[in-house]
Every structure is written in structure tokens, then in C-alpha cells.
Image: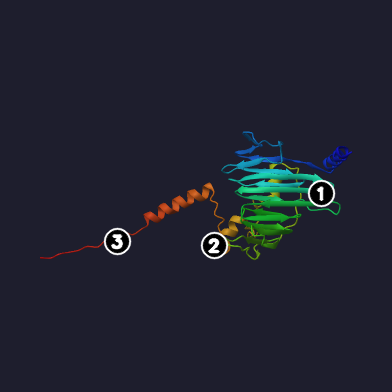
Amino acid sequence: MNKFLFLIIFLSVGLLAFGEAAVFRDVKGKVEYQLAGDDWMPAKVGASIPQGTVISTGFKSTAALEVMGSVIQVKPLTRMMLDELVRSASGTKTGLTLLAGKVKAEVKPSSEASATVFNVKSPTATASVRGTGFEFDGANILVGHGDVVFSNQWNIARSVQGGEFSSTGRGASVSPPVPVKPAEKPQITANGGSEQVDAMFQETPPSTTDGPSPPATDYGLNQVIDIYGDELIIDSGALTVVDEVKKAKDDSLDQQNVVPTFKLNLSIQ
């Protein structure tokens, strides 16, 4: 009787919650993925990847993934893992771990009938969202629209709204949200190719022929870092390949710019 009851419970859980797959909707440059225990394989548009897959992008390489109606754009020099892809009677749950680099996501909002849970974590911070667009590099977050609960490894959290930026600190701090751009309107799409994905994330500003182009107000994460500098951005401590090259170059220039000093002793007879 106990075994029979266990079987019924097991089958019921299987019907209520089951694993989903992410689908590559766009691939540019060198993009690879690795299933648990397998070798790295090149990513192709239309390929489905399950929970537990690790994704890696190279220089000038990006990928766009559809995950249960949400869209994740994986930026260059990024490595992330699909920790959890589950659909159940109550809704969907997506969990990602950002190991290095940066992602930008457009998360499908929750409906009255079901909930959408979308979490992205790194060694230093976690972004928990419910229907929003955001950009996250593991330590800094820029929210396009909606609301993100942004917390660090000590579970200190702040609510970051559309158009706001926040960062985790070296200590136990999470910086107060700073408005850096107008909040965007939600853009939910997951079935398009590269052109639709590019338009969705506004990678290329629209060109105009009549008069000068309007001033840019949609700051990306890199622009925010350039504008606010070290007063707002706290280095997470994880150097990317680009950071390492830049550091080596800066160190070399510093050495070249050192002005030598001489001490001359004269003895006149």
C-alpha cells in the first residue's frame, strides 16, 4: 500500500512540474554549450538545451535564448549555467548562474493564472525579477522596466525600478538605486530571429535623415560605469580577459611613464 501511494505521488508530481528546454534564437560569432559530462559543442539557431547546460561566448560573440517565453541575451566573453527550467501548474521558474560576463534579459510577466519566477545569481549578487527587463554583470544591475529585488550574498536587498541602477559593494552593502535613464515599456517577444532580437534590445540606435540625431538617453551598463566611475561602481574582483589585457597595458604604460631621478655627487679639487 505504501509503495502504491508513493507511486501515485511520484506520478502526480511529474504531471505538475516538469523540466523545460531553452532554445537558441540567435547566434553570432563563437558560441558554445556543454551538457553535463559532455564535450563543448557549437551552438546553432533552433538547438534546444536542457537544465544544467553551460553556455560560453567568445570575443564579439553573442547569443539570444528563449526560455519559456522570456528572452536572454548572452553578451561577449560570458559564461553562464541554466540551473533551473521548470514549468508547473502554478507557473514557470527559471534559475541562472552567471559565472562571468554579462547578460540582458526580457522576462515574461506573470499572469493572474500563473507566476513567472526568474532568478539570476552570481558569486556576489542575485537578481530576482517578475516581468521586467534588465542588464546584469554579476555585481551591477541596470533595470529597463519593472521591478527587480537585488540582493548580495549577505541577503541585503534593495528594490530597483525601471530606469534605475544599483551595485553590490565590497562589504555588505548594496548601493541605493540611481535613476540613469527613462523607464522602458515592456517588450515581450521570443519567437523572432536576429533582427527582432537586435531591435528588442536596441543595440543599434535608429538612423535619421532629417536633421541631427536626438541625444541618446538609453544608457547601457558600460556607459553607466563610464559616467559614474568608482564612486558608484565597485569592482566585483573577477577579471575578464579584456580586463586582464587592459590591466597589463596600463601597468606597462605606468612603468614607461616613471620619471627616473638621479643623484650626482661632484668632487672638485
Find residue 249 and name its label: none
**Residue type at numbered disc 3:** Thr
Q: Looking at the picture, does residue 28 appear above or below residue 207?
A: above
Instruction: Kindly state the secondary structure of the residue where label 2 is placed.
Output: helix
Contact? badges 3 and 2 (CB < 8 Å): no
Dividing the picture into quarters, in which one does residue 170 lie?
bottom right
Question: Looking at the image, is mark 3 or mark 1 nearer the viewer?
Answer: 1
Q: Is residue 222 toward the left or the right of residue 130 in the image?
A: left
**Residue sticking out furthest to the right:** 1
CA separation in Å, label 3 and label 2: 32 Å
- The 10 Å Cα crowd at callout 1, few under 14, some 14 to 19, many 20 or more, is some
For the point 68% across and 55% down, the residue is 127
Question: Percent position (x, y) of residue 178?
Answer: 64, 65
Pointer 3: what residue? 261
Question: Percent position (x, y) of residue 253?
Answer: 41, 54
Q: Looking at the picture, does residue 216 appear above or below residue 61?
A: below
Instruction: Kindly state the secondary structure of the residue where label 3 is placed.
Output: loop
CA separation in Å, label 3 and label 1: 70 Å
CA separation in Å, label 1 and label 2: 40 Å
For the N terminus, the quadrant is top right
**Residue type at numbered disc 1:** Gly
Pointer 1: what residue? 91
- The 10 Å Cα crowd at callout 2, few under 14, some 14 to 19, many 20 or more, is few
**Residue sticking out furthest to the left:** 269
Look at the image and name its color scheme. rainbow
For the point 54% across and 62% down, the residue is 230
Pointer 2: what residue? 230
Q: Visible in this render: residue 203?
A: no
